[in-house]
Amino acid sequence: MIMEGVKNKADGTSQVALYTVMYPVFKQLEEADASAAQILRSAFTEAEKQNPGLTQEFLLKVLEKKKQKVNYHESLLRMAAVDAQALPELRIDRQEPEFQELNERARALKRILGTIPDEIGDRVGFLQTIKDIASAIKELLDTVNTVFKKYQYQNRRALEQQKREFVYYSRKFSDTLKVFFKDGKAINVYVSANRLTHQTNMILQAFKTVD
């Protein structure tokens, strides 16, 4: 088996793969051929939109062909935490302090999630990481609530729905941790953490689109 814990279908983390793996590749390509980079970026973005999971399938095929044995979800989690908000697609441009704080809270959460693979084997260290994640989630939600109170939006209902999605996956992550301490299956924690990373990105994208 080439990959551990991966099914060749969309599992809620495929868009993380698009941003985490492919977009940095396109950014590097821009230095050599900006036009080609833009064409590929647009093509992959549209293809992922129309066929969720396509990016993941593409990456799995590449790794399979190269005969690379990789824990896909662990690698994705680590990569998502590196320079977590360098991509303009995942950064709110508005300069008001509340929006910049939202950027920072999201970046902090993704970076803490990215430490899970290093800490999960050490019970004491992992318990502290879980506490840090819980605090980061609360701080992000507090900032979202502050933005809601201070600013008015025409698409407020959509923004509130995205917040509910984030809360839902935060709770699912907590449930996954409870199961992990019974069965010891780290891969399920990685998958759930990647889904939470995705929801964090969706929070940023939702607020990025408002005027």
Image (tube, rainbow, N blue to C red):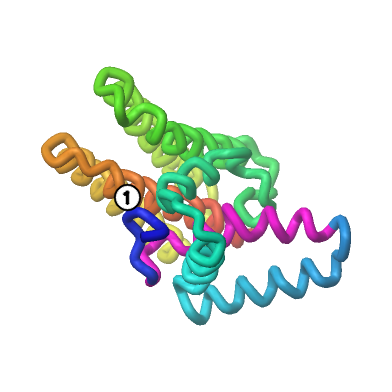
Q: Which residue is drawn at 48% across and 57% down?
A: 202
Q: Quadrant of residue 205?
A: bottom right
| Prevailing SS of the magenta stretch | helix
**How many marks are shown on the rendered structure?**
1
Q: Which residue is drawn at 28% across and 42% down?
A: 186
Query: Where does residue 168 sit, x and y in percent of width and height?
Result: 28, 53
The one of 134 and 5 positioned closer to us in this rendering: 5
Query: Where does residue 72 sit, x and y in percent of width and height?
Result: 43, 53
Q: Could you tell me which quadrant the C terminus lies in?
A: bottom right
Q: Could you tell me which quadrant the N terminus lies in?
A: bottom left
Based on the picture, tell me whether residue 72 belongs to the magenta stretch. Answer: no
In the picture of the structure, the residue carrying the numbered disc 1 is 192
Question: Seen from this angle, which residue lies furthest bottom?
Answer: 50
| Residue 12 left/right relative to 50 | left
Query: Where does residue 173 sit, x and y in percent of width and height?
Result: 27, 45
Question: Seen from this angle, which residue lies furthest top?
Answer: 124
The one of 203 and 124 positioned closer to us in this rendering: 124
Q: Is residue 210 visible?
A: no
Provide the secondary structure element on which disc 1 rests.
Answer: helix
The one of 112 and 61 positioned closer to us in this rendering: 61
Q: Which residue is drawn at 14% across and 41% down?
A: 183
Query: Where does residue 94 sit, x and y in percent of width and height?
Result: 68, 47
Amino acid at pointer 1: Ser
Region in magenta: 9-30
Picture layout, residue 93 above or below residue 155: above
Picture layout, residue 121 above or below residue 9: above
Based on the picture, tell me whether residue 24 belongs to the magenta stretch. Answer: yes
| Residue 108 left/right relative to 208 | left
Picture layout, residue 164 above or below residue 185: below
Q: Quadrant of residue 209?
A: bottom right
| Residue 122 left/right relative to 34 | left
